Amino acid sequence: MINDKIRNIAIIAHVDHGKTTLVDALLKQSHIFRENEQVNERIMDSNDLEKERGITILSKNTSVMYKDVKINIVDTPGHADFGGEVERVLKTVDGVLLLVDAFEGPMPQTREVLKKSLALNLKPIVIINKIDRPGSNPIKVVDQVLELFIELDANDDQLEFPVVFASAKNGVAKMKLEEESDNINCIFETIINDIHAPNCDEDGAVQMLVSNIDYDEYVGRIAVGRIERGIIKQGMPISICKNDDNVVTSRVAKIYTHIGLNKIEVEEAKARRYYRIIRDTRYKYWGNNL
């Protein structure tokens, strides 16, 4: 079953290429916040160390609505020290936004993460950011990105990547440098047009791939992942397969879905949406049900 009302993407970039700033712009221009609401910069960097160092350490999940399509976004670490976090979440999405600085071009961490996303056959969208930076050369950087794709053995479909030119700090994006723009709507349009909608099996036995672990002081550990198959409902029994091949049985207590940065409790989680699922024994499943 193809769900055309859902898109699942991850944003990958080298540290300080503007990834978290772009997520801020996507959230703000999707009208997630009230007009009179006070919103800080770097919304997704909630961790104290992230705020201090100005980098993303932990993967974050959010969603935006554009027209009638829900776009689930994973904002992933961009520093080489936290590359493993990126690799795990790539399996929960269907496409990636590759963000590259218009002055610096592709960097080593960009190469490594891109290589893994291409190997997973994820559809890329290239965003050349900071086009307003003095000394930037967006066209040259596009050529560098193409050369990188070729070096990494991208397939023909991946080589036909769309390019968006942006200044995330100013909330502006456009498909051609000579165009005038005062918004980032073309990024939303490109995501909808170029990233494949998820192909889901709602009728099969429930299956969820856990990709990360989080923690909540009220409910304990949180398993972050993607529901690949079936429908999970409150109160239903579940089995947890651990790395040591042991299987733990439990029961679903609560389920949440993301809307913007907030979570809303729902009664069931299908293999096509975005949820958190809490186990009765205080082991909370966060279904990246994309």
Image (tube, rainbow, N blue to C red):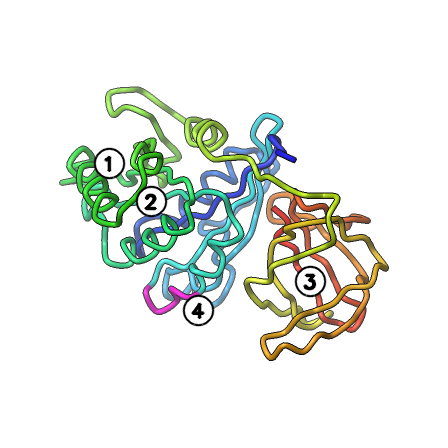
Instruction: Name which of mark 3 and mark 1 comes first in the sequence.
Output: 1
Judging depth in this view, the residue of 193 and 137 nearest the camera is 193
The residues tagged by marks 3 and 1 sit, at their Cα atoms, a distance apart of: 42 Å
Which residue position holds label 1? 132
Q: Looking at the picture, how far across and down is residue 234, in whole percent?
A: 83, 56
Q: Quadrant of residue 168?
A: top left
Q: Nearer the viewer, mark 2 or mark 4?
A: 2
Q: Secondary structure at mark 2?
A: strand
Give the number of the mark in front: 3 or 1: 3
Q: Earlier in the sequence, mark 3 or mark 2?
A: 2
Total labels drawn = 4
Residue ranking furthest to the top? 179
Q: Magenta span has 83?
A: yes
Name the residue beneath numbered marker 3: 285
Query: Which residue does the numbered mark 2 point to in the structure image?
Result: 99
Q: CA distance from mark 2 to mark 4?
A: 23 Å
Specify the amino acid type for callout 1: Asp
